[in-house]
Image (cartoon, rainbow, N blue to C red):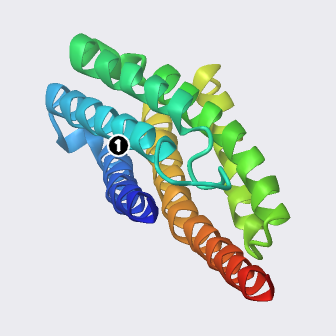
Amino acid sequence: MKSSLKFAKILYIICSFLLCAVGILYIAGHSIATDILCYVIGGTLILCGIVKIIGYFSYDIYHLAFQFDLALGILVIIIGILFLVQSGSTVDSSNLHIGLFVLIDGVFKLQTATDAKKFGLGKWWIILLGSVFCIGSGCFLIFDLLDNRDIVNILIGVSLLIDGGQNLFNAYYTVKIIDRLHDKKEKNKIRFSKKS
């Protein structure tokens, strides 16, 4: 059971790197064909959505690392499918799609930050800062508050980079805390059985 959590962590880390790579592609998107960019983004989001769902069903007894990933995974898969099906036209509305994803993920990570603090994760504030940035950038993208398309693409890229980096942080540190709490629980069980 514990191995399923480690497997989910590995997949989560891979997808986080892919998300960061998509962010970089968005920042340098002018040199990449529109259709290719759509397929890369769509495929990456679908893969990340599947991994999030797998993470949700892994052995996370404290529901800290992947607690909201079932709903978010389904949302990410839907956004990924939109990128694949609508292809070039999706790039024009990508600020709405990516903005929605980043905003919702940021809101969920606010809860993760407070839970991480409760479980004793000393760097919980890093999750909080990342989530606040994602919420802010998500609002900018959804409401199309920037007129310049180049700046919008940079903001999308930076948002995906921060979201991917945040996922890496969550996967590493929150799973580390879960392992520590699990080991502590096992030691307490052994101690209690010896007393009995």
Tell me which corner region of the image, top left, top right, bottom left or bottom right, holds residue 173: bottom right
Taking the spot 73% from the left edge, 88% from the top edge, the residue there is: 194
Which structural element holds mark 1? Answer: helix
Depicted 61 relative to depicted 70: above or below? below
Kindly identify the residue that appears in the image at 51 percent across and 54 percent down.
59
Q: Which residue is mark 1?
A: 26
Residue at 75% of width from left, 66% of height from top? 124
Which of 20/31 is in front?
Answer: 20
Residue at x 47% of width, y 42% of height: 57
Query: Looking at the rendering, which quadrant does residue 129 occupy?
Result: bottom right
Looking at the rendered structure, the kind of residue marked 1 is Tyr
- Left of 29 or right of it: where is 111? right
Q: Using the image, determine if residue 187 lies above or below residue 104.
A: below
- Relative horizontal placement of residue 175, taking residue 120 as reference (left or right): left
State the quadrant of the C terminus. Answer: bottom right
The quadrant of the picture occupied by the N terminus is bottom left
Task: Please give left or right for residue 53 compared with residue 25 in the image.
Answer: right
Q: Nearer the viewer, residue 152 or 182?
A: 182
Q: Is residue 171 above or below residue 38?
A: below
Residue 64 location in percent, x, y?
66, 54
